[in-house]
Image (tube, grey):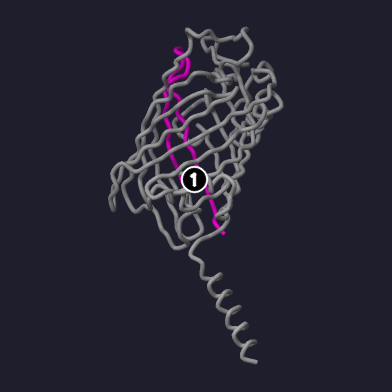
Amino acid sequence: MKLMVYIALGLFTHLVIAQETDQYDHEIELGTDNDFLIIYTGTDRYYTYGINGAFRWRNKENHFVAKRFKKAQQSYSEININVEAYTPEYLSDGSMDPNEDRPYAGWAYANYAIAMAFEHSFVRLGDDIGIIGPDSQAGGIQNWFHREISGDVELQGWENQLPNQFGINLRGKYGFEIKEGQWFDIYSTMDTSIGNIYIYGRPMVHFRIGNFQPVQYSVGQDNQLLGNKNQKEFYFDTGFGAKLSVFNATIQGNLFDNDSLITQDEINNLVFNGYFGLCFLRNRTSIEFKYHLATGELKSSEVNRYASLSFAQRF
C-alpha cells in the first residue's frame, strides 16, 4: 500500500513540475517584407516583397548538432517557407523603366536552421533549398496583390524574368553582446551565405533601448522561444552595417553561366544597410516592425527601402 502511495505521489509531482515549466516548446511565426508598408513609397523596386512562415521547436539535449557545441545552454530548430520578389523600378503604366538594368527575379525556398544560445552570444546555422525563376510564382503573387488588394497597376516584365534554376545556400549567423545594460545595450552580428544564389558576408552593430532580454533570448533576433514564459520585452531596435557581396543570382543569373546580363563593372560589391524599429513580446505573443534601407547593389540603383512586419505565437 505504501509503495502505491509513493508511486502516486511521484507521478503527481512529475505532472506538476511538467505543467509548471517556465518555457514554451513550440512557436509559429508569419511575416512579410514589403515596400507597400512604407506609405510614401510610390513604386515597387529592387527587393519589393517577401512572405514567410516558420515553425520552431526546442531541441532536446542530445540533438545531433547542439551536442557538438559543448557550451551551448539550449537550442531550437526551425523550418520556414519563403517567397521573395525582385524587380526593377517601373513606370506608371507598369512597364519597366528603360534606365533600369535590374532583371525581374523570383526566389522561393525552404530553410532549415538550428539556433543555439550561449552565455553571452548565439549561433544560427542553416541551409536554403529552392528555385529561382518562374516556378517560384513570385510574379503571379505580386500581380495578384496589385490587382486584388492594393489596386496598383500590374507589372509588365515578369514574363522576361530570370529562368528557372535550382538554388542552395548554406547560411550562418553569430551574435554577441558588446555592452550589456539594463535599459541600453550594444551587440554585434555577423551573417554569411555561400551557395549558387548568394555569396556574401555582412557584419552589423546593433543598439537597443527599452525593456529587453539578453540577445540570445530576445525577439529582435528571433530567439524568443529560448526565453521564459513570463518574459516581457518592448524596445527600440536599430542597427547598421555593410554587406560584402561576391555573388547575387537575383541580379547576375546563373553562377555557372558566363552570359550574364549584368557586367561586373555595373555591380556594387559593398552594400551599406541599416534599419530601425520596435520589438514587442508579452507572454505567448511577439511582434516586430522594422524599417530597412540599403544602398543599391547596382551602381545605377537608388537606395532600397522596405518595411518588415512579423507576428509569432509561442505554445
> Circle 1: is it few (<14), some (14-19), or many (20+) Cα within 10 Å?
few
Residue 29, position as x, y percentages in the image:
56, 48
Would you place residue 33 above or below residue 165 in this image? below
Task: Tell me the quarter of the image containing the C terminus.
Answer: bottom right
Query: Above or below — where is 215 with respect to 43?
Result: below
Q: Is residue 84 magenta?
A: no
Q: Position of residue 179 (x, y in %)?
A: 28, 44
- Locate residue 205 relative to residue 172 in the image: left or right: left
- Residue 314 on the magenta segment: yes
Left or right for 18, reference 238 = right
Q: Is residue 70 left or right of residue 170?
A: left
Measuring 68% from the left and 25% from the top, which residue is drawn there? 166
Toward which corner of the image does residue 31 lie, by quadrant?
top right
User: Residue 225 location, x and y as percent?
Assistant: 51, 53
Region rendered in magenta? 288-315
Amino acid type at image mark 1: Phe
At x 47% / y 18%, what residue is drawn?
Answer: 297
Local SS, label 1: loop
* Residue at 28% from the left image edge and 53% from the top image edge: 182
Nearer-the-camera pick, 138 or 10: 10
Residue 266 drawn at (x, y percent): 48, 9
